[in-house]
Amino acid sequence: MKPAQHPTALRTQRLLAEAGIDTQVVEFEQPTRTSAEAAAAIGCTVAEIAKSVVFRAKQSGGAVVVVASGDNRVCEDKVARLVGEKLGRADADFVRAATGYAIGGVAPLGHAGPVRLLLDADLQRFARIWAAAGTPFSVFPLTPGPLAALTAAAWTDIRQEA
């Protein structure tokens, strides 16, 4: 683990500081693009990873970003009901265009365009969570309260039931 050096991770660090979030973006030699990879690199549980799952809203064409606990599968039907329209798959080009980030590095802030953002209520069970910082090798820690304030998003039930 080392301090952020990639320009996108440094941009995320600047945005966090401007928002008053006192945290440090860090980078790893190994990828952190999946919840399992990030948890292994950090040394935390998969559940403590705040993964970003991006959908494409079918009617509006807009991006829907769900920040979910790494151990949860996102229920597409629940998310569709919450945003009021059906969802489709978001390919890598759409994710990059809508968020400004590559898949595996979508941060919960600093998106390229407007996105609809939802937070998984299950993230509130942790004292510290880790979110992507704009690249598939960078993350930052924060607590659930500042994540909600930073994103201005509500806590919701998005978990796929077993």
Image: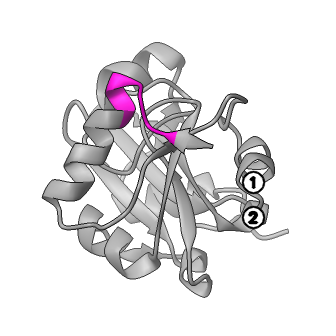
Quick one: label 1, few (<14), some, or many (20+) residues within 10 Å? some
**Horizontal relation, residue 48 to residue 46: left or right:** left
Element carrying mark 1: helix
Q: Is residue 130 above or below residue 104?
A: below
Q: Quadrant of the C terminus?
A: bottom right
> Mark 2 or mark 1, which is nearer the start of the sequence?
1
Q: Residue at x 51, y 54 (%)?
A: 131
Q: How many angstroms separate mark 1 from mark 2 (CA)?
A: 5 Å
Given residues 85 and 151, the one toward you in this image is 151
- Residue at the spot x=23%, y=30% of the render? 112
Q: Position of residue 154 (x, y in %)?
A: 34, 75
Give the class, few, some or many, for how many residues have Cα within 10 Å of label 2's Cα (few <14, many ≥20).
some
Instruction: Find the residue positioned furthest to the right.
Output: 162
Helix, strand or loop at label 2? It is loop
Residue 44: numbered disc: 2
Q: Which residue is mark 1?
A: 39
Q: Which residues are magenta?
A: 3-9
- Residue at coordinates 44% horizontally, 42% vertically from top-left? 133
Farthest left residue in view: 18
Q: Does residue 150 appear in the picture of this structure?
A: yes
Looking at the picture, does residue 43 appear above or below residue 93? below
The magenta stretch spans residue 45: no
> Residue 94 sits in which quadrant?
top left
Q: Residue furthest top?
A: 93
Please identify the quarter of the rendering in which residue 10 is found: top left
The disc labelled 1 sits on which kind of residue?
Ala
Image coords of residue 11 (percent x, y): 26, 35
Q: Does the residue at mark 1 contact the one at mark 2 (Cβ under 8 Å)?
A: yes
Above or below — where is 89 with respect to 1? Answer: above
The residue positioned 19% from the left and 40% from the top of the image is: 114
On screen, residue 22 versus residue 37, left or right, reads left
